[in-house]
Image: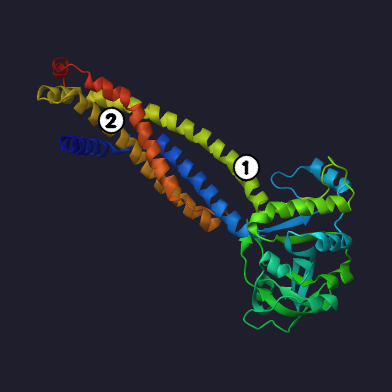
């Protein structure tokens, strides 16, 4: 009980001291505030992006993967790009049919090919629309769901019909509140009947995911050809066999391309796990840089707190002498100044939390960067700042507790 009373008294004295010198306290805490704001802001960006990548960037699901001519996960390397252009052949329909007939660990596989094109309806025109030719199972494999109408069918693909499944951007721009099903749009001058509209998917880093048109793959090949830009999309038989399914795909592709043992793959296989691992690597570098900055701010803030606490000890020397003369123990004096330095730093941490929250709101309001402040970041920042205050307050508190009461009382107030 005495310990609780002693702590409460020390906290009350510390709070009174902080409030009596608001400007000095705030200036003292600038380093801690900057460190806390930086730490929480970076953790909020990383947390928000983790959630964003998991939910939005990849539409392959936990058991899906893609086969591409080349892929850059992380930093783009121009030299590698030129090397891949020279070394990696285009994927082909014949190769796709071979893989589909031989694979045992793949539940479903489809193909797609795409390009940018202009799309018109009446006098309205949208340029740089991503036009894709896809197989009828593409929507199921990539989880593209219709909000209106339906997706493409095998019959439409076999008959090379001029039908289109459009993204929400085209629906809003061309039709507004009008039902688009059955309407005819023009893709580079060719008429296509709209049979369905996809559910809105939002944007990724400010780039819309709803600015697209899908047509049957055979229709696309009839118009644009099938020799460039093909990719395969596949689903493993289940999540547990994803790695084995990718290995099987790799083996079949290497066999089709007659690659020798030890030769590098001349294609790329990309899964959701690959994107997440690449993102983790990138955020790890960001976090490391943030820790270095935060460490500098924390050390600077801690040194400033120590200097201020030494000044406070000098100012209150007479008070320390009075407290010791009426029975205060060395431990009581030590606790008082440790609590004061910790509260000082923790206050800076709380102010930093408020600043970081305001930064998060501003970023979410004015930029496409997804930020989400995790509770763990707030707790970590406040606890870390209080720990810094406690550590750098040890020397001033120890110095105060060791004062001789007689010498302290002699000091003029």
Left or right of 221? Residue 46 is: left
| Number of residue marks | 2
* Figure quadrant of the C terminus: top left
* Figure quadrant of the N terminus: top left
Mark 1 burial class by Cα count in 10 Å: few <14, some 14-19, many 20+? few
Give the number of the mark in front: 2 or 1: 1
Foreground pick, 266 / 342: 266
> Which of the 4 image quadrants contains residue 185?
bottom right
Q: Which residue is mark 1?
A: 281
Q: Which residue is mark 2?
A: 338
Q: Residue 292: x percent and y percent?
A: 52, 33
Left or right of 168? Residue 132 is: right
- Tell me: residue 318, above or below residue 237: above
**Secondary structure of residue under mark 2:** helix
Residue shown at the point (33%, 31%) measured from the top left: 390
Residue located farthest toward the left when viewing the structure as drawn? 326
Left or right of 143? Residue 6 is: left
Q: Is residue 368 visible?
A: no
Q: Which mark is residue 389?
A: none
Residue shown at the point (84%, 76%) measured from the top left: 158
């Amino acid at each position: 009980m005495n310990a609780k009373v002693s702590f409460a008294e020390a906290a009350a004295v510390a709070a009174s001291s902080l409030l009596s010198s608001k400007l000095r306290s705030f200036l003292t805490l600038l380093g801690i505030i900057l460190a806390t704001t930086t730490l929480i802001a970076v953790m909020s960006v990383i947390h928000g992006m983790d959630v964003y990548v998991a939910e939005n960037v990849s539409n392959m699901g936990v058991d899906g993967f893609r086969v591409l001519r080349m892929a850059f996960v992380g930093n783009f390397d121009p030299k590698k790009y030129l090397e891949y252009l020279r070394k990696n052949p285009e994927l082909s329909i014949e190769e796709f049919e071979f893989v589909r007939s031989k694979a045992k660990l793949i539940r479903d596989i489809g193909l797609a090919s795409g390009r940018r094109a202009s799309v018109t309806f009446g006098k309205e025109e949208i340029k740089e629309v991503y036009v894709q030719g896809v197989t009828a199972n593409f929507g199921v494999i990539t989880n593209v769901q219709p909000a209106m109408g339906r997706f493409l069918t095998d019959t439409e693909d076999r008959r090379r019909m001029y039908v289109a499944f459009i993204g929400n951007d085209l629906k809003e721009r061309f039709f507004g509140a009008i039902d688009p099903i059955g309407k005819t749009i023009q893709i580079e001058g060719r008429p296509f009947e709209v049979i369905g509209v996809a559910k809105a998917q939002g944007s990724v880093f400010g780039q819309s995911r709803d600015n697209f048109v899908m047509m049957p793959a055979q229709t696309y090949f009839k118009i644009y050809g099938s020799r460039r830009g093909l990719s395969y999309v596949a689903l493993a038989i289940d999540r547990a066999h994803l790695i084995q399914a990718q290995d099987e795909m790799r083996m079949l592709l290497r066999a089709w391309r007659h690659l020798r043992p030890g030769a590098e793959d001349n294609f790329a296989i990309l899964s959701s796990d690959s994107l997440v691992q690449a993102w983790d690597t990138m955020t790890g570098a960001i976090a490391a840089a943030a820790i270095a900055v935060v460490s500098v701010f924390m050390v600077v803030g801690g040194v400033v707190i120590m200097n201020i606490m030494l000044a406070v000890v000098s100012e209150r020397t007479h008070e320390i002498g009075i407290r010791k003369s009426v029975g205060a123990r060395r431990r009581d004096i030590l606790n008082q100044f440790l609590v004061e330095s910790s509260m000082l730093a923790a206050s800076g941490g709380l102010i930093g939390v408020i600043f970081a929250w305001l930064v998060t709101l501003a970023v979410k309001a004015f930029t496409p960067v997804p930020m989400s402040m995790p509770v763990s970041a707030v707790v970590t920042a406040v606890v870390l700042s209080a720990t810094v205050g406690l550590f750098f307050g040890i020397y001033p508190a120890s110095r105060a507790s060791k004062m001789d009461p007689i010498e302290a009382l002699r000091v003029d107030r």
